[in-house]
Image: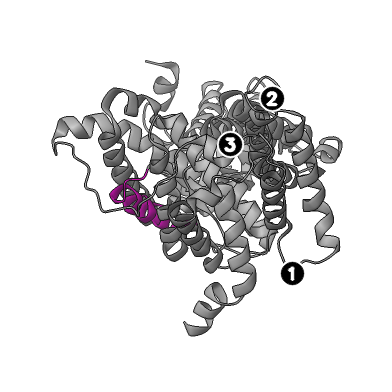
Amino acid sequence: MVVSLRNTWFGNIRGDLLAGMVVALALIPEAIAFSVIAGVDPKVGLYASFSMTVIIAFSGGRPGMISAATGAMALLMVTLVKEHGLQYLLAATLLTGVLQIIAGYLRLGSLMRFVSRSVVTGFVNALAILIFMAQLPELNPNTLGVTWHVYAMTATGLGIIYLFPYLTRAVPSPLVTIVVLTAVALLLDLDIRSVGDMGALPDTLPIFLWPEVPLTLETLAIIFPYALSLAVVGLLESLMTATIIDDLTDTPSDKNRECKGQGIANIGTGLLGGMAGCAMIGQSVINIKSGGRGRLSTFAAGLFLLLMVVFLGDWVAQIPMAALVAVMIMVSIGTFSWESLANLKKHPTSASVVMITTVVVVVATHNLAYGVFVGVLLAALFFANKVGQYKYVTSTLSADGTTRHYTVVGQVFFASADKFVEFFDFREAVDKVVIDLCQAHFWDITAVAALDKAVLKFRREGTAVEIVGLNEASATIVDKFAVHDKPDAVARLMGH
């Protein structure tokens, strides 16, 4: 216990604290922007980012991962806020947390094993594209305050980010970028957009708030659909991000604990006046690339965020957006799986189609849940089709020409059941047919129905049928659902 605590909290103190500072700075404009999307005051997103980050540091299952207010969650809140107001959003946030805790106890985090590598790669690439696209308004020449100075500052920031590590890795280069560009902007008195232009920063600490909504079934009917959507999208994004961070750090994480941790964090967020949130891949990657590895980095990010916006708000407001744009462009470049482009020719066509489809759907809809759902569905269909192809039937005729022996090899289920029946010659004039299933497996009732169909068709032609070699699992489902060994089986087959 003590060793685990030391490793996850105090095994990388200096790196975690510096990384936490970088993440805190990157969280500020994001939280404000997401508040605007949701239609709430900027302080709602900032309080959410603080509370989510601090609470998840203790309750989450993935050390070093950052959770806060996110764009994917904000988009789901727009209608609720517009029609019912902030108090109902806070109530929905609490219910979101409860649903996520239930998901954790139901061990739904284990379902991540059904998400294929192609879907994860598509998810990562889509997020990288969305992160980059989110920076384009800050570089749009038609946007107020965007001059050539912005492009120069952004280019300088990227230069510092990628070149500074050659000098020293003692200080994260994104932090150096933010400090240097802020100093340049202040010294030269550049008229460019800054964090303060995004919205007013809070000047007080968050306080305990119970949502002022009637505790009635009508309220539940209003918030439940939103809470369910928020819970699903939040868990999906969090678990996918956890998988990515697992790969980046070569360490495992507890997905079911992460479900519960996200739920606890959202309940805490709702009680402190914040909007529902989830894991953020961009900030999580910033944390890892800046040297953050343990829970202390996540906790420090939340703590620094609160201190900065409440006590150092005047200074933080002076940070040029160009500096943060440079950091986020670095994140998008580092997040994108460039290897996946080279693998398009190497990997099976089905895997490439799944990856590309996931990217297209996520980017087109800006909804991670849609993209992952479509990707998982496609991967399942391709898998079922591929497994269904690994099946064949051989046959031999006895020396006296009276008995045909069929040997079935492979998996028989809904995708291969029709092909299974097509292998048999029902009009051959033989007295007996032996169907050897010792190298086959029957998975579902569709497969059992196909076996019934084959046996009863042979019997209808006056041919005796013997089934041999069923393994235990196949025999169990066949015995339970088959009708070929039941009275009036032929009549059932013919629909009489």
Q: Are the residues at dot 1 and dot 2 in contact (C-beta closer than 8 Å)?
A: no
Chief SS of the magenta region: helix
Is disc 2 in contact with disc 3, using a CB cutoff of under 8 Å? no
**Residue type (three-letter) at the residue carrying disc 3:** Val
Residue nearest the viewer, comparing 337 with 29 = 29
Q: Name the residue under label 1.
A: 170
What range is drawn magenta here?
254-274
Q: Can residue 368 be seen in this view?
A: yes
Q: Disc 2 versus disc 3: distance between alpha carbons? A: 36 Å
Q: What element carries label 2?
A: loop
Q: Where is residue 291 in the image (x, y as percent from the top left)?
A: 67, 64
* Residue 108 image label: none
Q: Work out whether 282 lies above or below 147.
A: below
- Element type where label 1 sits in the image: loop
* Neighbours of disc 3 within 10 Å: few (<14), some (14-19), many (20+): many
Above or below, 460 relative to 44: above
Q: Residues within 10 Å of mark 2 (few under 14, many from 20)?
A: some
**Residue 76 in the image, given as x and y percentages of width and height:** 42, 31
Where does label 3 land, which residue?
376
